[in-house]
Image (tube, rainbow, N blue to C red):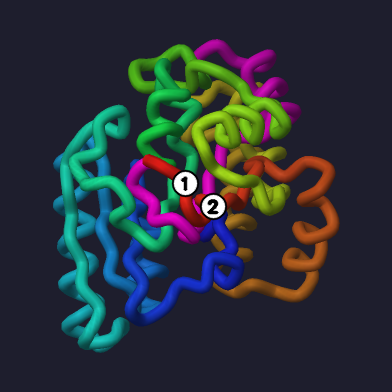
Amino acid sequence: MLTVDFDRLCIGPGRSVLDVGCGAGRHAFEAYRRGADVVAFDHDATELEGVAAMFAGMAEEGDASAEATTTTKVGDALDLPFPDDSFDVVIASEVLEHIVEDEKAMWELARVVKPGGSVAVTVPRWLPERICWALSDAYHEVEGGHVRIYRASELTDRLRAAGLRPLGTDYAHALHAPYWWLKCAVGVDREDHPLTKAYHRMLVWDMLRAPWLTHTAERLLDPLIGKSVVVYLDKPEGAVA
């Protein structure tokens, strides 16, 4: 399930991509599948072991170009271990809402992307996230949980202040917002509730089959209740890291 529109980032052979806070690796895998040279970066070494194993499996199955390369790297988003102007594309999906010093992380994203390069940042959208917080403290009051809720304009302004140029905003995963509202209403740790189980089955069916009905419904609902907001940016030519 991708949050970022890869076609907007022109990811392909010969392009270097950094996935910051890659988690289980969904965006890193798509970048590799498209032939890019990918660095999957996260603070969780255990997650990265799974990502490396998937990269190896993709290479073995021929799911990526033989010329594409992959690397996994453990580290801190507040101090990225890469030189200035290193990557053609930097992705940070569902990361900044977890970081107390988010503006420092934004400056790091801007520092490591090349002038003329692209950045995509996604965070939970204000309204769906506000409803989750209102319904359940357990949803966000956990170790490593969400520490803030962004408005799209606030996020864009902070990224602009870090030296990036906003190019556009999009929304994604509208069908997932009601699922999380249900989870928060019945208890985020309850895996056996019939409503959430049934909704989860529908989401899995949608991801596996991509039927016209749910695809169209989500596209129409994304501007209204999309669970995530996506900001696309670039680093202006001549910008100083």
Secondary element at image label 2: loop
Q: Is residue 53 left or right of residue 87?
A: left
Above/below status of 161 relative to 31: above
Q: Residue furthest front?
A: 238
User: Which of the 4 quarters of the picture holds residue 60?
Assistant: bottom left
Instruction: Point out which mark residue 239 bears.
Output: 1
- Whether residue 1 appears in this view of the structure is no
Report the amino acid beneath label 1.
Ala
Q: Give the residue displayed 28% in from the left and 86% down from the top.
A: 65
Instruction: Point out which mark residue 236 bears.
Output: 2
Above/below status of 235 relative to 12: above
Above/below status of 183 relative to 23: above
174 and 92: which one is in front?
92
User: Is 42 inside the magenta-drawn segment?
Assistant: no
Figure quadrant of the C terminus: top left
Q: Which residues are magenta?
A: 111-138
User: Which of the 4 quarters of the picture holds residue 32?
Assistant: bottom left
The answer to whether marks 2 and 1 mark residues whose Cβ atoms lie closer than 8 Å is: yes
Q: Is residue 227 left or right of residue 63?
A: right
102 and 31: which one is in front?
102
Tell me residue 18's x, y (percent): 33, 55
Tell me residue 156's x, y (percent): 65, 35
Instruction: Point out which mark residue 86 bears.
Output: none
